[in-house]
Amino acid sequence: MPSQMNSEPRNSSANRKVAIGVTAIFIAEFVSLLFANARNIAQPGMIAELDGMALFAWLIALPALAGAAATLLFGKLSDVYGRRSMILLSIAIFSLGLGISASSTSMTSLVISQTFMTIGHFPILPLCFAVVGDLFPPSDRAKWTGLLNLPVGFSALLGPVLGGAVAESVFGWRGLYWGTIPLILTAGVLVAFALPDTAQKVKPKMDVLGTFVMVVATTNLILGFSWLGTPNMVGIGALLLFVSLVAWIVFIQVEKRAEAPILDLQVLFNRTFVTAAVAGLLSFFGMVAITGYSPIFVQQVMAISPTLSGSMLTPFSALVAFLGVPVGFLLAKTRKYRWVYIFSYTMVTLALLAMWRFTASTPIWVYVLVTGIAGIGLGMIPTVNTVVAQFAVPKHLLGVAVGAIFFFQMIGIAVSPAILGFAQNSTSDPESGLKLVFLVSAVALAAALLLILTIPEISLEVAEFGESE
């Protein structure tokens, strides 16, 4: 009887600490995404004040490169030094970058400071998802991974409103940066207090050479695709893609010999993981086509006002933002994910094929319906990808796997606009170009669907050993 009474306070204490830990990662994720969504609206004010339109492309490209590399690196480091330590480091770099960016007096200094800032900013989200594997048993991970989409959804709804309000206030765009610092530091205090220490006792040597080669490969890949879509830069773009291919081959050879590879070959050559990751990369062709190009089609071809066109995309945005929550519960209940993958990629492929047939006379309700169907598919994919990444590899590679999933997503975000932009510019009139964008995206999603049909159905019950294929 006494032992039972003693165990109850211990269980209560443990549950309370888990609750604080969940609150910490929810706040860290929410603040990180809220800032990202708000900054997109405040960005024109930065460019106007600093007269920086000439460097705008670099304000996107360089931070994206730094953030992609940091996401993969911090994911690996979190498996060695623990998720808590790496989230705290990310928050520290992010906070310092926010302050430096807010103090920028030129576009050049803003590009440099934002590039530094994303080294801490980008890894926060995947590290928060990886923490789920530390806090919860396998039976609960799918549910909580789904619930982590709540901050994603609310930040997507509130961020643009906040960004516009702050940018138009007396504080200007700099107020957004200064105001984010106390919020993210509050999350850091909770993280330090609540998250468990999962650091390895024996620290392996870090994979410096592998990290360097990966950065070279990624940089040339993104710049190569970007310049391939520019008429007078096609040759340089092709050369950079060749350099990237060689660098990736060298990277694999380096990782085979590394004591602690930044991207463990158990992850890179894991059939389940690679299938999910590459299909996820291709899914961003659909995301970019709908969020980036379909509003142009609505306004220029269908002759609908910007205000109305924005509201037409609201159902799509809401589905993408919040659908991950029920999907997480569904995966937790069924323990099966292949049907979720097949259903989601099929929905997006069919929706993009329908958009390919859009014309100037397409009714508004048809556009809303079709993009809503696409939103169902695209809203399901991130949650199932994160769950599969957690179960496809041994638990000691959890941080690497989740970080790598997000790394592939960032590559998709960087590569797809270049290819779709090339498709749009290859025709003689805007309507034909935009319809070609939807067709190319449909082909990419169809390829992803064919790929996902081959994915093995691994167990979502035990995550200690992972899938061996």
Image: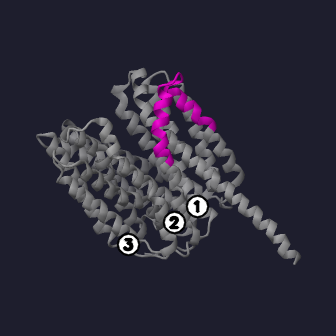
Amino acid type of the residue tagged 3 in the rendering: Trp
**Which span is picked out in magenta?**
154-182
Q: Distance between the residues labelled 3 and 2?
A: 18 Å
Q: How far apart are marks 1 and 2 (CA)?
A: 9 Å
Residue behind mark 2: 390
Q: Are marks 1 and 2 in contact (CB under 8 Å)?
A: yes
> For the residue labelled by badge 3, is the local secondary structure a helix, a strand or a loop?
helix
Q: Which residue is most to the right?
A: 2
Q: Earlier in the sequence, mark 1 or mark 3?
A: 1
- Residue 415: % across, % down: 32, 48
Amino acid type of the residue tagged 1 in the rendering: Val
Q: Which residue is most to the left?
A: 428
Q: Which of marks 1 and 2 is nearer the N terminus?
A: 1
Residue behind mark 1: 132
Q: How crowded is mark 1: few (under 14 residues within 10 Å), some or many (20 or more)?
A: many
Question: Is 233 on the left-hand or right-hand side of 395?
Answer: left
